[in-house]
Amino acid sequence: MTSPLVLPAAPLLEQYGEEARLCSCANDQLTLVFSRRHPFDLVELEQLLEAVGWSRRPVRRVRKALANSLLTVGLWRHDPRIPRLVGFARCTGDGVFEATVWDVAVHPLYQGSGLGSQLMVYVLEALEAMGTERVSLFADPGVVNFYQRQGWELEPQQHRCAFWYAS
Amino acid sequence: MTSPLVLPAAPLLEQYGEEARLCSCANDQLTLVFSRRHPFDLVELEQLLEAVGWSRRPVRRVRKALANSLLTVGLWRHDPRIPRLVGFARCTGDGVFEATVWDVAVHPLYQGSGLGSQLMVYVLEALEAMGTERVSLFADPGVVNFYQRQGWELEPQQHRCAFWYAS
């Protein structure tokens, strides 16, 4: 898989980690950055997940789940001092034979301009770099087409588990 | 979930760990023990998985996958010095909101007497004790009924993902 994601300038790499990538968006006033390293404010994270319609979860349990996750990715609206979290995804799994993507979210104010697709590219590249063989996710009926357009394959019988195979 | 699994005597707990449980079987000459702690010989493990018909995987990658797993369970034919691995299962996941069961195997010589069902009880009790909310697995068509009989629920549309909910 070749990446459409752009490497940010040195100051952003310092702030967001060396695996950080830019997320392109229609509004050129914004700088959006994918990061695997920038820490999360768990209240801000749950507010994001609530904004996309999911029910709030106890922060203590979310903290444990993130600590046990294989990969956590934030999409940040850049600010030198206080970046805002506008997207998120995490993965569990062994990182070798399989991984599963959870909690894929882009804030409603930032949806509809391809940020979700770039988020999935960033996630899959990170998993592929680990040597992960297969990635699965559980897609709601409303987003199955979104994942199929990106090359995810549904299992037979029209169920809602989608798989991605490392090239 | 109440456990039909029996606590072994002190010497076995010392050998297999405090979470060890006895696995009942028809042959009263055998002592079979579930353990989350007894170390695996990765060659013996891959031989077991081969015996149930899966293709062998590189030991280096298996070691990494086990290290990244949330839970690994061995079913051991007890011997004070050299226990033999006759069953296995492992789980990945965050251990909070979800976990997924992989590599469920009972050696063909030991199949057909309820060992697999007891193995799943042991696995689910361990996950429930962690506070895991939902457990999933990917069942081959041939074993879907096996899991349904144990209370696993298939998603709509007859697909092959089964879920277990913590009581």
Image (cartoon, coloured by chain):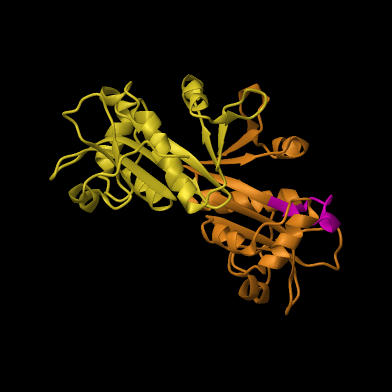
Chain colours: A yellow, B orange
Q: In this view of the protein, can residue A43 be seen by the observer?
A: yes
* x and y percentages locating residue B115 in the rendered image: 76, 53
Residue range highlighted in magenta: B104-115
In depth, the one of B1 and B15 nearer the eye is: B15
Q: Residue at x 68, y 72 (%)?
A: B9
The location of residue B18, given as percent across then percent down, is: 58, 68
In magenta segment, residue B110: yes
**Residue B161 horizontal/vertical position (percent):** 62, 34
Q: Residue at x 71, y 56 (%)?
A: B56
Name of the residue lying farthest toward the bottom: B81
Residue B52 to residue B9: above or below:
above
Q: Is residue B94 visible?
A: no
Total count of labels: 0
Q: Residue at x 30, y 36 (%)?
A: A46
Q: Quadrant of the C terminus of chain A?
A: top right
When asked about the image quadrant of residue B137, the answer is top right
Name the quadrant containing residue B109.
bottom right
> Where is B11 relative to B65, above or below?
below
Residue A135 belongs to magenta span:
no
Q: Residue A151 at what x, y percent from top left?
A: 53, 30
Q: In the image, A38: left or right of B101?
A: left
* Residue A134 position by quadrant: top right
